[in-house]
Structures are given as structure tokens and as C-alpha cells.
Amino acid sequence: MEKQIRMKNHKTPIALLIAFLLCLGYSRDFIFKGINVLLYNAIRRTDYAAPDFFFFMQSWSYNNLYGLKWILTLLFTLFYFWLQWKLIELIFHQENINKWLIYFYLILILLATFAFSIGYFMHQTDIGYSFSRKFMGIVQSPLPAMIIIPAALLKIRMEEIQQK
């Protein structure tokens, strides 16, 4: 009974964290697509319309826009990590499960770095970027929590069964 009451008290913060994760995803998508339009315009000397939100960036150079994407990638990765950390913490109250998130992120960021580096050193930056982008796309999404939460629930259930 106590466990149910405790979970009931956490439903609102959990729902809010999930809502923030969803809003973060839509915001990230909107921002990066808008910047990509501006980058395309800078490279191709075209004038595709970007959303009005990006009016102040229209005169930025390609390098400035590209640098901004790197900064935003870092920020969105940190935001996603923090929100998922809080979500897992609220659900499980176990530090060792939160460590899974750290390992998940470290592995994917190392794979992204490795893929980008290999592409760079083999003069295949487009291929290296493409692979690294896939790994970074995972850490900039709720996917890590969507994998870790069911895995942790399974682990806890299996431990309960073993103790019986």
C-alpha cells in the first residue's frame, strides 16, 4: 500500500519530465531544421525561407551557424541527459540504475567521436558525420530512458523472483 501511495505522489513530476522531454524534442527539431535551412542558403547562395524565428541569424556566416550547431548539440545532449537522469531517479531511487544512463551516454558519445574521427582521417567526412550523427541523435532523444527503464524494471523483477 505504501509503495502505491509513493508512486501516486510521483505521477505528476514523472508526467512533467516526460512532457519536457517531448517539448525538448520538438524544440530541438525546429531549431536544427531552421539552422540547416540557413546553412544550405549560405552554401548554395539560395534564399529559402527560414521560419521568422531565425531572422536574426540570416546574416550569420556559414562558420558561425555551424559553430552554433556544435554548441547546441552539446546543450541539447546535456538537457536530455539531465531530464532522463531525473526521470530515472524519480522512478527507481537507485543510483546504480542512473549509472546505466551515464554508461549509455558515454558509449554513444565515444562511438560518435570515433565515427567522426575515422571519417575525418580517411577524408570521408560526410560518411563519418553521417554515422556520428546517428549516435548523437540517440543521445538527443528520450531513447536512452526508453531502453533503460524497461531494462531496470526487468532487472528488479528478476531479483524479486530470485529472492523468493
Image (cartoon, rainbow, N blue to C red):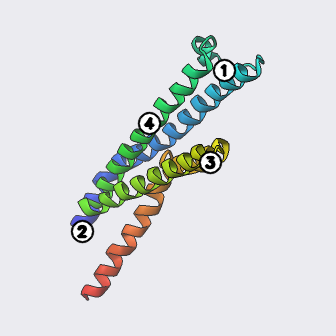
Upstream in sequence: badge 2 or badge 4: 2
Q: How many marks?
A: 4
Three-letter amino acid code at the position of disc 1: Pro
Pick the residue in front: 117 or 106.
117
Look at mark 4 in the image and give the residue it sits on: 74
Upstream in sequence: badge 4 or badge 1: 1
Pick the residue in front: 88 or 68.
68
The residue tagged with tag 4: helix, strand or loop? helix
The residue tagged with tag 2: helix, strand or loop? loop
Look at mark 3 in the image and give the residue it sits on: 122
Residue at figure coordinates x 39%, y 45% from the top left: 17
State how far apart marks 2 and 4 are (Cα): 42 Å
Three-letter amino acid code at the position of disc 4: Leu
Residue 63 rendering spot, x and y as whole percentages: 57, 22
Residue at figure coordinates x 60%, y 50% from the top left: 131
Q: Tell me the crowding category of disc 4: few under 14, some 14 to 19, or many 20 or more residues within 10 angstroms, Cα based.
A: few
Of circles 1 and 3, the one toward us is 3
Three-letter amino acid code at the position of disc 3: Met
Upstream in sequence: badge 1 or badge 2: 2
Contact check, label 1 and label 3, Cβ < 8 Å: no
Look at mark 1 in the image and give the residue it sits on: 51
Q: Quadrant of the N terminus?
A: bottom left
